[in-house]
Amino acid sequence: MNKIGLIAGAGNLPLEFAKNVSLSKRPLEIFAIKRITDKSIQQYGKTHWLNFGEAQKLIDLMKDREVKDVVMLGKIEHYSLIFSLHKLDRRAREFFNSLKDRRAKTILEAVLKELEKEGFNPIDPTPYLKSLLMPKGLLNSIEPDETLLEDAEFGIDIAKKVADLDIGQTVIVKNKIVVAVEGIEGTDKCIIRGGELAGEGIVICKVARRNQDMRYDVPVIGLNTLKSIKKVKGKLLAVESEKLFLLDREEFIKTADKYKISVVGM
């Protein structure tokens, strides 16, 4: 059975993956980033800590540890990456300088190709995360009214177009008007901006790319998403079913009910 190498960013997603791989008894090596990856990940496997941007060290370590299959999970903020190029080692700088542009999709697809060139096999993590996929339909007990659902259908369609342009994967809608589109700032800040512009009652629409490669950059929703929506008195979170990961499901549903936010998989 091939050993899996997990390149872990921030958040709970790499923790869930590591936990499920450890339960499956498959060998796992974790490559974590100092000051970014949650330290509790160490309980699930041999963990190697690297500084941000140590690309050559990462590749050498994975080869030394006889890793073949590789998974990349967890958040590394796009804006942090773009504005921290001075921290990259020579290998990483050469990689970035070779890119045609620095959109998230361009970067991540090029990383996969670079890993393949080095003899690694980037794999789909979904078999270890199936329980996290967002289901279709109403997730919690807060029924949205028809007007909100119409906004959601309108917003999901716009969000798909925006995601395919690799601008962002979230749009904020009110009364069938797009009031905010996610850019480099990320989902939570986009929600706050949309609420500041449109006031309470906004609808948040989040999707995957039309041909989402599940090996990288799969959208995630979690408790922080709900907290941002509550801050601006949003009413509905509409997300694409079977294409997004939902973290902390039970706590998420309880919190959505408490905040009076409808959550629908579409």
Image (cartoon, rainbow, N blue to C red):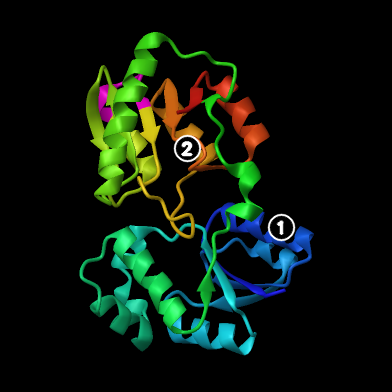
First along the sequence among labels 1 and 2: 1
Give the image location of residue 153, x and y in percent.
34, 23
Q: Which residues are magenta?
A: 196-203
Give the image location of residue 265, x and y in percent.
49, 29
Q: Amino acid at mark 2?
A: Thr
The quadrant where residue 32 appears: bottom right
Q: Amino acid at mark 1?
A: Lys
- Inspect this view and state whether residue 54 appears: no
Is residue 202 part of the magenta span, yes or no? yes
Is residue 208 rendered to the left or right of residue 5?
left
| Rendered residue at 40%/78% (across/down) | 114
Secondary structure of the residue carrying numbered label 1: helix
Secondary structure of the residue carrying numbered label 2: helix
Give the image location of residue 13, x and y in percent.
58, 53
| Rendered residue at 45%/74% (across/down) | 52
- Quickly name the residue at label 1: 19
- Inspect this view and state whether residue 94 appears: yes
Comparing marks 1 and 2, which lies closer to the viewer? Answer: 1
Give the vertical position of 51 relative to 181 (above or below): below
Give the vertical position of 227 relative to 10 (above or below): above
Is residue 99 rendered to the left or right of residue 84?
left
| Rendered residue at 34%/88% (across/down) | 90
Q: Which numbered marker is on residue 81?
A: none
Looking at the rendered image, the quarter that the N terminus falls into is bottom right
| Mark 2, other Cα within 10 Å: few <14 / some 14–19 / many ≥20 | some
| Mark 1, other Cα within 10 Å: few <14 / some 14–19 / many ≥20 | some
- Quickly name the residue at label 2: 225
Give the vertical position of 24 relative to 89 (above or below): above
